[in-house]
Image (cartoon, rainbow, N blue to C red):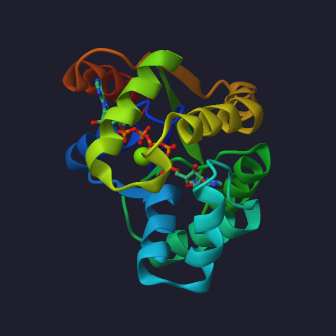
Amino acid sequence: MFNVILFGPPGSGKGTQSEKLIAHYGVKHLSTGDLLRSEIAQGTPLGLEAKSVMDKGQLVPDEVVIGMISSALERNPTVPGFLFDGFPRTVAQAEALDKLLALKHTEIGVVLALDVSEEELVGRLLNRGKTSGRSDDTNEEIIRARIIEYKNKTTTVAQYYAQFNKVVHIAGEGSVDEIFESLRIEIDGRK
Ligand code: AP5
Ligand code: MG
C-alpha cells in the first residue's frame, strides 16, 4: 500500500490533481473538504456545525475531521493506497493519521506539496467562485482568511513530515498536465 498526502494552500490544485492521480493509480481519494461538504448537503448535525466554521474560512475542530478519516479508512480495507487531500491540516491531525495508519501496518509514503503564489491562489479561487457554488469562494475576504488559517495552522504539517524526509515540493503553477507529470515522477520514484 502506498499512501500520498497532496499538500498545499487553498486553490493550489489539490482537487484538480487528485482526479488525475485517482484515474492513474486507482488510489482511494480522501478529501476532508469533500466529506464535510457532503455532510452539509445531507443536512446532518455534523454538517450544520461545520458549515458555520467553513463559511468563515476557519478550520473545523481536529476531532471532527480525524473521526471522519478514521471511519473512511475502516470502510476501505482493500484499496491499493490512500490519497489524502486537505488532510492533515494541523500537527495534531498528522500525528493522529500516523497512528491510524500504523494500526493498519502502513504509513505515509510521500507528502507532495504544491507551491503556488498567494496572488495566483486568490485569482483562481475568485474565478472558481463565479460558478462553484462554494460559499467559501464567494469573496476575497473569506479566501484570504483561508490562506491566513493555512499559514498559521497548516504550514507546520510540512515541517512535521520534513523531519522524516517525506516532503517534496512541486511547482504548482503551469499547466495541469505538466504539474501532474511532476507528481507522477515523484510517486513512481518512491513506490
Ligand atoms: P477544502 O475543501 O480542503 O478546500 P481548500 O484546501 O481551501 O482548497 P480548495 O479545495 O479550494 O483548493 P484545491 O487545492 O483543491 O484546488 P482546486 O484543484 O480546487 O477545505 C474547505 C474547508 O473545509 C476548510 O476551509 C475548512 O473549513 C474545512 N476543512 C477541510 N479539511 C479540513 C481539515 N483537515 N481540518 C479542518 N478543517 C478542514 O483548484 C482551485 C481552482 O484553480 C479551480 O478552479 C481549478 O480549476 C483551478 N486550477 C487548478 N489547477 C490549476 C492550474 N494548474 N492552473 C490554473 N488553474 C488551476
Ligand atoms: Mg479541494
Give the residue at x 65% y 74%. 49
The correct choice, above or below, for 45 with respect to 68 in the image is below
Picture quarter containing residue 145?
top right
The correct choice, above or below, for 85 with respect to 119 in the image is below
Is 140 left or right of 130, judged from the image as shown?
right
Give the residue at x 59% y 71%. 68
Residue 101: image location, x then y, percent: 63, 58
Residue 138: image location, x then y, percent: 43, 45
Q: Is residue 76 visible?
A: no
The correct choice, above or below, for 74 with respect to 180 in the image is below
Is 113 left or right of 20, judged from the image as shown?
right
Quadrant including the C terminus: top left
Residue 72: image location, x then y, percent: 51, 71
Instruction: Pick the residue in front: 9 or 140.
Output: 140
Is 69 left or right of 76, judged from the image as shown?
right
Instruction: Pick the residue in front: 157 or 141.
Output: 141
Residue 70: image location, x then y, percent: 61, 70
Picture quarter containing residue 134?
bottom left
Give the residue at x 66% y 35%. 150
Instruction: Pick the residue in front: 150 or 17.
Output: 150
Q: Is residue 90 visible?
A: yes
The correct choice, above or below, for 74 with respect to 151 in the image is below
Give the mark count: 0
Picture quarter containing residue 81?
bottom left
